[in-house]
Amino acid sequence: GPVSTEIASCDLPSTGTYTILTHDDFNDNYTGDYYLYLQRLNNPGNRVPITFGGTLSGSIATPAEMDTYTFSASAGDKVLVGMSISSGDLWAGIKVYAPDGTKLCEEYGPTSDRITSCSLTSTGTYTILAYDGLNGTYTGDYYLYLQRLNNPGNTVPITFGGTLCGSIAMPG
């Protein structure tokens, strides 16, 4: 593409060393600097665990960067994932991948976005990628929230007719 490009899923047929070739894709006439990001979708590297009902802060410090979060879930679970920008030009972008690396859900927006119900297909460890959802060129800080909808984590019981006090301590 003219600003950025992505290979969203590439099946590697065997164990070994692979090569990534970068080049100008417009007649090979232009030069310039670039950023390159690599992540394995079915057993990602450099991941941060997130729990149901949890909110974590993160930062996209360089263009093309994607932050990786993982959580364990069961087949049939439904999750809500939210991302809220706290500083920078970043557009909120979130993707959820199954344990086998298959993309299940994706959303992006200018200041915040939310996957309101993502159905999980199997039991195992799932991956969330948080990224710049516009062109992959912007940076900034954000908050990421995860909740299981069919058996929520970090809940507070309330009775019918009852009143509770609460506080939202972090955006997202």
Image (cartoon, rainbow, N blue to C red):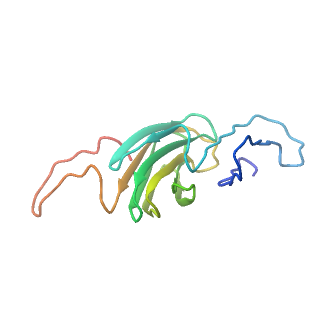
Q: Is residue 141 visible?
A: no
Q: Horizontal placement of 88 versus 134: left or right? A: left
The quadrant holding residue 22 is top right
In the image, what residue occupies the spot 46% across and 39% down? Answer: 48
Which residue occupies the extreme front position in the image?
15
Where 162 sits versus 37, above or below?
below
**Which of 126 and 142 lies nearest the eye of the viewer?**
126
Question: Could you say which is closer to the camera, residue 85 or residue 53?
Answer: 53
Query: Across the whole image, how many numbered discs are drawn on residues?
Result: 0
Instruction: Name the residue nearer the viewer: 157 or 172.
Output: 157
Q: In this view, does 59 lie above or below 168?
A: above
Query: Residue sitting at 51 percent across and 57 percent down?
Result: 98
Residue 156 percent coordinates (x, y): 20, 51
Along the horizontal axis of the image, is 3 left or right of 30? left
User: What is the x, y in percent for residue 144?
Assistant: 43, 45
Left or right of 49 on screen, residue 34 = right
Q: In which quarter of the image is residue 79?
A: bottom left
- Residue in view at x 57 percent, y 34 percent: 61
Rendered location of residue 107, percent (x, y): 52, 57
Q: In this view, does 15 lie to the left or right of 96?
A: right
Q: Position of residue 100 (x, y in %)?
A: 55, 56
| Residue 78 appears in the picture as rendered | yes
